Amino acid sequence: MGFGAWDFGFRKGSDLSRRAALFLLLLLVLVWLVAGAYLVLVSQTMVAARRVQGLREELARLQKENALLEQRIAKIQTVERLRRAAEEMGFVPAIQVEFVEP
């Protein structure tokens, strides 16, 4: 038994080689396009992942900075510190307090 049953619809001779060459060329172009699209998607995903990582690092840095600022604010706003600042500006404790009714 020869290859007659396995000719895949191609005719013998030059027509077979032309069709086979065209089929292989189209197949290679299709594989190249799919591979190119895949590489573009992978590249875009990697760029996005790097950007997300950078944003996470910036978020962590800003959270630390925010915590330090909150500590400074808490230290500045202690009652004793506010009392001293008021005395330095010339304020004195009220001796008699009067309330005004509307």
Image (cartoon, rainbow, N blue to C red):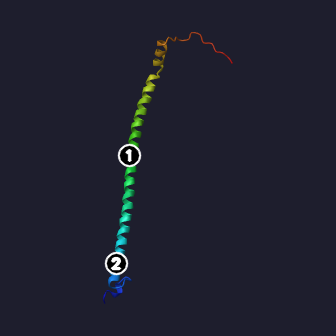
Residue with the most extreme bottom position: 1
Q: Amino acid at mark 1?
A: Gln
16 to 26, vertically: above or below: below
Residue picked out by circle 2:
20
Find residue 91 and name its label. Answer: none
Which residue occupies 39% across, 53% down? Answer: 45
**What amino acid is labelled 2 in the image?**
Ala
Write the residue at 63% across / 12% down.
98
Q: Secondary structure at mark 2?
A: helix
Residue at 35% x, 87% y is 5
Is 78 left, or right, of 21 in this rendering? Answer: right
**Spatial CA span between label 2 and label 1:** 49 Å
Which numbered disc covers residue 53? 1
Mark 2 burial class by Cα count in 10 Å: few <14, some 14-19, many 20+: few
Q: Look at the picture and state if 2 lies above or below 51.
A: below
Quarter of the image with the C terminus is: top right
Q: Is residue 84 above or below residue 63?
A: above
Q: Of helix, strand and loop, which one carries label 1?
A: helix
Position of the N terminus by quadrant:
bottom left
- Picture quarter containing residue 33? bottom left
Q: Quadrant of residue 55?
A: top left
| Front one among 94 and 87 | 87
Q: In x, y percent, where is residue 11?
A: 36, 85
Callout 1 environment at 10 Å: few (<14), some (14 to 19), or many (20+)?
A: few
